């Protein structure tokens, strides 16, 4: 295996709901290698989305050490995390989460607005990203004019466009039919294999998990087994 | 600038809502511009008043008449450049509704004192050589269709002719305008010779209503005021002299609470508006919480999200304000030309700047609460709520 | 029909129950319309108060004689000879001892300042007689005493005294030829309360006037006016205009009243446009958030009419609440509020109270309902046209 990209050491996460404290992750140790494609599975409430949010820098651990590349995410402020996310992580959501008022191109361009690239340079990269997901000619369409599969591809292009090392996907095929889902998963596979993106994907669909290199099972906040695909 | 398409698209997320909101803001700024125009018209006399001009009236009231001998005495003062006696004619053209001020005055010194009144030289000469001649403001000539050469009948409200008749008639020999169109409302009047007026009237001969005095050195105005009033102190016809500015100001003050009334209307309009616009911005942000969370996920900082929502509010308010002000600047000239005493009303640069300031303040007040809400959004919660 | 009615009431009740949960947005209609109605009623109440003060002045069985051609007392001159002719005219009421009940009066302006200001205000000085009550029975001294004949003493109208604290009992006011002593405060219940009254002979001496401004005449009866007027107009010794007293004062309030009314309606119409847009916004939003409920009702077989009517009723109820709120605010803040301004038709200061009358409140409410109707109609039509299946799928 190549060098480790993501390292969790004794990571815990708990939420306070009123007077109750809910332990979501308990002293989790986990290492994900650079270039890996991980499917994260587990029943509802197992903490898989929480784990994904931590890895993606959307949330911070309550305790323990979380390292992505050279960066200690557990020690960063919200503002630092935002800057870090814009450079290093791409997100894909179950419901695509495209901005309905913007065209596909403008949606894909969003992460680039946070860079110092010129407008021309941004458009060039947007076209490349749309090309990679096979939607080069749909750039001018609004999300409402796209099918579910197309919308998810636009979302993937948006995740790719800033050329992050890590892609974080939360149920990316949860809202798609089997055939479209397989196409999207295949696209993720290509991104992993040919473009070297490390992918962490939460799914409850075993068929989807088959596209990953490894599958991790999470239950009650702990890893239960580590199977090699 | 690169965020502009994002702000623009968000602004038009619900087109009818944005249009309605813009329309109501535009309407408020239209009203603002019209009302400040009215206030400006009330105050015009104060702003335009000549620094070198004084007005001498009877001590107890402007309506007291003064003996014409006063003119000579004031003219004799070393510090005085020139003097023009003037009276209030108080007549009307055809009916009382067609009221406009008519002043019998000493035309030559009067015109020399008021360089802001622009009259062709030939018409001025015609006036000086025509005993029954009259000059009238361009706005009045337009309103009543008067042309040079017309005979203008004026019915006396105060001063009948020696015969007892109220029907005066003047020969219109000149039409004047003001150097600056916005001063038109101030000089919307008719002038004729005081000498003719005095000879022809039934009673009150040998008196003038008041004196307009031009001083040699405006810095010495206060001293000249004391000199003039001292001339007539303890005489049967004591005087009260004031700068033209103070004199005009006293008329504005006499209107009393009208200015305060206007300001409170503008206040009520903007307060009402605050609710309308604030509601729109709140609605708009509420609908977009998941989208704003996505932006944050992509790495937009709290400050950037705040700025985006504020920019949207700013765009909404500024565009609407500009539409309202544009509409006002189109409407003001034709409307004001029809209202006696308000001719030449325009939207001044100052009022425009103040309006933009108001739009800015409005944008901040209505934009800040939703912007803060957007800024404080917790990504994890907002996405989960989806 | 009864089924339509029961449908309407069912849907309306359902909508209204949802209002508290959308209190914030519903308040936009209420406050927007309250703003319009408040401004409208406040401005019109100013006009109404002004008119009531001037137009409410005078008795129909009294006539005012001015120089022919003069529109007001200030610009009028009546000589002593003419005053005598007028007093001898037919129709003039007489006292028990046979003297005519007429008042030849002098009418001047003097400058009065408010405390802390040197800015002059044109205040009316009326030279009249100490027995003025014989022709003006509404005159009553409420404080101090009446001026003494021939003495430089002043009685101040109640409204004027309230607006100008400088005119306090025991103080002085510059009338003509130096300060005069204020000895009393009077009331008449009309525009004269904005005046200073002094003895006419004292004023004639001080102002060196030879003629009067006007003659006020108590007629034998209301009907005697025509004979009186005809006699004066036919008399070759006179060029006079004869008016019933109320007509004269009504004509003196016309221009300012019209200006206030014109301003009030212009402002209100423009504001109303803004408020209607606000109401449209809110009602469209209300329909949008309830599209599923509406579609469910339609699916259950409710007709389009109940949906339309219910949305309209909701808008009207909110608008009525706004109208009432605006009216109440205008009433609380402005009713009885006294202001003074320059009546440019008489060139003199007049003090008057704002009057928020029931008629104005009713007018405000009608405006509110019209705004509510327009603001509710289009959203209501959209609600009725909502495609049922699509709206349900969106749930």
Image (cartoon, coloured by chain):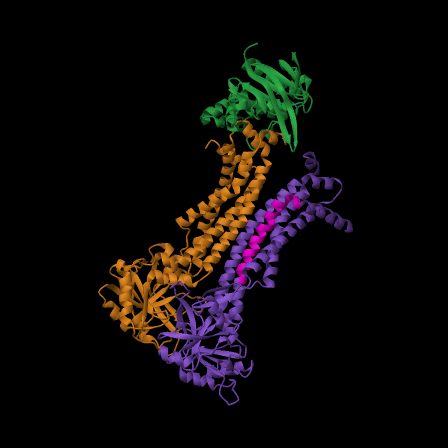
Which quadrant is home to the C terminus of chain C?
top right
Chain green in the figure, letter: A
Q: Colour of chain B?
A: orange
Relative to B28, say whether B174 is above or below. below
Relative to C101, say whether B109 is above or below. above
| Spot occupied by residue B203 in the image (x, y as percentages of width and height) | 35, 77
Residue C67, can we see it? Answer: no
Relative to A74, say whether C29 is above or below. below
Magenta-colored stretch includes residue C29 = yes
Chain purple in the figure, letter: C
| Residue furthest to the bottom | C97
**Bounds of the magenta segment:** C19-45
User: Residue, x 54% and y 28% (percent of image)?
Assistant: A107
| Spot occupied by residue A151 in the image (x, y as percentages of width and height) | 60, 26
Pick the front one: A171 or C6: A171
Relative to A121, say whether C107 is above or below. below
């Amino acid at each position: 295996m190549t060098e480790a990209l993501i390292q969790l050491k004794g990571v815990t996460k708990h939420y306070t709901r009123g007077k109750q404290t809910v332990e979501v992750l308990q002293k989790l140790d986990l290492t994900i290698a650079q270039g890996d494609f991980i499917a994260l599975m587990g029943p509802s409430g197992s903490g898989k989305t929480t784990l994904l949010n931590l890895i993606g820098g959307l949330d911070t651990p309550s305790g323990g050490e979380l390292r992505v590349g050279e960066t200690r995410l557990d020690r960063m402020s919200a503002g630092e995390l935002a800057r870090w996310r814009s450079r290093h992580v791409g997100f894909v959501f179950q419901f695509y989460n495209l901005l309905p008022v913007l065209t596909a191109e403008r949606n894909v361009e969003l992460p680039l607005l946070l860079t110092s690239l010129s407008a021309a340079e941004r458009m060039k990269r947007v076209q490349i990203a749309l090309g990679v997901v096979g939607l080069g000619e749909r750039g001018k369409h609004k999300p409402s004019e796209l099918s579910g599969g197309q919308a998810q591809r636009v979302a993937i292009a948006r995740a790719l466009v800033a050329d992050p090392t890590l892609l974080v996907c939360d149920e990316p095929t949860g809202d798609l039919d089997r055939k479209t889902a397989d196409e999207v998963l295949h696209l993720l596979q290509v991104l992993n294999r040919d473009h070297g993106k490390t992918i962490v994907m939460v799914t409850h669909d075993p068929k989807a998990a088959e596209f990953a290199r490894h599958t991790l099972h999470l239950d009650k906040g702990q890893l239960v087994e580590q199977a090699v695909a | 600038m690169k965020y502009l398409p994002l702000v623009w698209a968000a602004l038009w997320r619900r087109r009818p809502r944005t249009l309605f909101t813009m329309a109501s803001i535009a309407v408020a700024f239209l009203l603002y511009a019209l009302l400040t125009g009215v206030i400006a018209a009330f105050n015009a006399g104060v702003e335009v008043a000549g620094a070198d001009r004084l007005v001498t009236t009877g001590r107890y009231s402007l309506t007291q008449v003064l003996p014409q001998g006063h003119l000579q005495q004031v003219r004799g003062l070393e510090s005085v450049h020139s003097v023009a006696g003037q009276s209030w004619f108080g007549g009307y053209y055809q009916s009382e509704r067609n009221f406009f001020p008519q002043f019998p005055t000493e035309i030559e010194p009067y015109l020399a004192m008021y360089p802001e009144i622009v009259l062709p030289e030939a018409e001025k000469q015609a006036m000086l050589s025509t005993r029954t001649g009259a000059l009238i403001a361009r706005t009045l000539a337009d309103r009543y269709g008067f042309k040079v050469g017309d005979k203008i009948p004026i019915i006396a409200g105060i001063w009948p002719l020696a015969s007892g008749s109220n029907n005066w008639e003047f020969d219109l020999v000149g039409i004047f305008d003001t150097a600056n169109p916005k001063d038109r409302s101030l000089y919307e009047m008719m002038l004729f010779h005081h000498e003719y007026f005095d000879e022809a009237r039934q009673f009150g001969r040998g008196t003038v209503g008041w004196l307009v005095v031009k001083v040699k050195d405006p810095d010495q105005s206060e001293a000249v005021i004391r000199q003039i009033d001292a001339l007539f102190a303890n005489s049967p016809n004591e005087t009260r002299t004031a700068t033209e500015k103070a004199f005009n100001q006293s008329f504005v003050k006499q209107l009393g609470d009208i200015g305060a009334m206007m300001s409170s209307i503008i206040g009520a309009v903007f307060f009402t508006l605050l609710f309308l616009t604030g509601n729109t911005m709140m609605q708009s942000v509420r609908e977009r919480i998941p989208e704003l969370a996505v932006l944050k996920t992509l790495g937009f900082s709290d400050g950037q999200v705040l700025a985006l929502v504020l920019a949207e509010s700013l765009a909404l308010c500024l565009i609407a304000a500009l539409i309202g002000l544009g509409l006002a600047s189109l409407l003001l000239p034709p409307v004001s030309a029809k209202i006696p005493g308000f001719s030449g009303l325009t939207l001044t640069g100052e009022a425009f700047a103040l309006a933009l300031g108001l739009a800015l303040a409005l944008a901040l007040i209505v934009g800040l609460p939703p912007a803060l809400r957007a800024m404080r959004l917790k990504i994890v919660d907002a996405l989960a709520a989806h | 029909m009864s089924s339509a009615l029961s449908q309407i009431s069912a849907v309306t009740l359902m909508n209204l129950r949802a209002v508290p949960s959308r209190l914030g947005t519903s308040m936009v209609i209420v406050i927007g319309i309250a703003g319009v109605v408040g401004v409208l009623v406040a401005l019109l109440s100013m006009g109404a108060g002004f008119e009531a003060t001037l137009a409410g002045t005078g008795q129909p069985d009294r006539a005012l004689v001015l120089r022919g051609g003069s529109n007001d007392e200030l610009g009028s001159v009546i000589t002593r000879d003419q005053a005598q002719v007028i007093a001898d005219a037919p129709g003039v009421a007489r006292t028990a001892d046979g003297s005519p009940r007429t008042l030849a009066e002098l009418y001047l302006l003097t400058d009065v300042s408010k405390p802390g200001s040197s800015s002059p205000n044109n205040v009316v000085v009326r030279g009249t007689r100490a027995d003025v009550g014989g022709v003006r029975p509404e005159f009553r001294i409420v404080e101090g005493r009446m001026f003494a004949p021939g003495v430089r003493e002043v009685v101040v109208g109640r409204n004027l005294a309230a607006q100008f604290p400088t005119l306090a009992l025991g103080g002085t006011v510059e009338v003509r030829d130096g300060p005069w002593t204020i000895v009393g405060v009077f009331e008449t219940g009309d525009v004269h309360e904005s005046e200073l009254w002094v003895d006419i002979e004292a004023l004639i001496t001080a102002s060196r006037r030879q003629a009067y401004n006007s003659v006020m005449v108590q007629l034998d009866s209301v009907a005697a006016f025509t004979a009186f007027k005809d006699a004066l107009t036919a008399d070759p010794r006179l060029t006079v205009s004869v008016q019933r007293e109320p007509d004269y004062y009504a004509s003196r309030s016309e221009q300012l009243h019209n200006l206030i009314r014109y301003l009030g309606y212009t402002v209100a119409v423009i504001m109303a446009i803004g408020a209607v847009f606000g109401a449209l916004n809110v009602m469209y939003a209300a329909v949008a958030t309830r599209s599923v409920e509406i579609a469910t009702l339609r699916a259950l077989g409710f007709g389009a009419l109940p949906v339309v009517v219910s949305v309209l009723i909701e808008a009207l109820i909110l608008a009525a609440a706004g109208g009432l709120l605006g009216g109440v605010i205008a009433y609380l803040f402005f009713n009885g509020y006294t202001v003074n301004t320059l009546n440019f038709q008489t060139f003199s200061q007049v003090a008057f109270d704002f009057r928020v009358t029931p008629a104005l409140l009713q007018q405000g409410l009608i405006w509110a309902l019209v705004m509510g109707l327009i603001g509710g109609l289009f959203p209501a039509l959209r609600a009725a046209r909502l495609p049922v299946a699509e709206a349900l799928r969106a749930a």
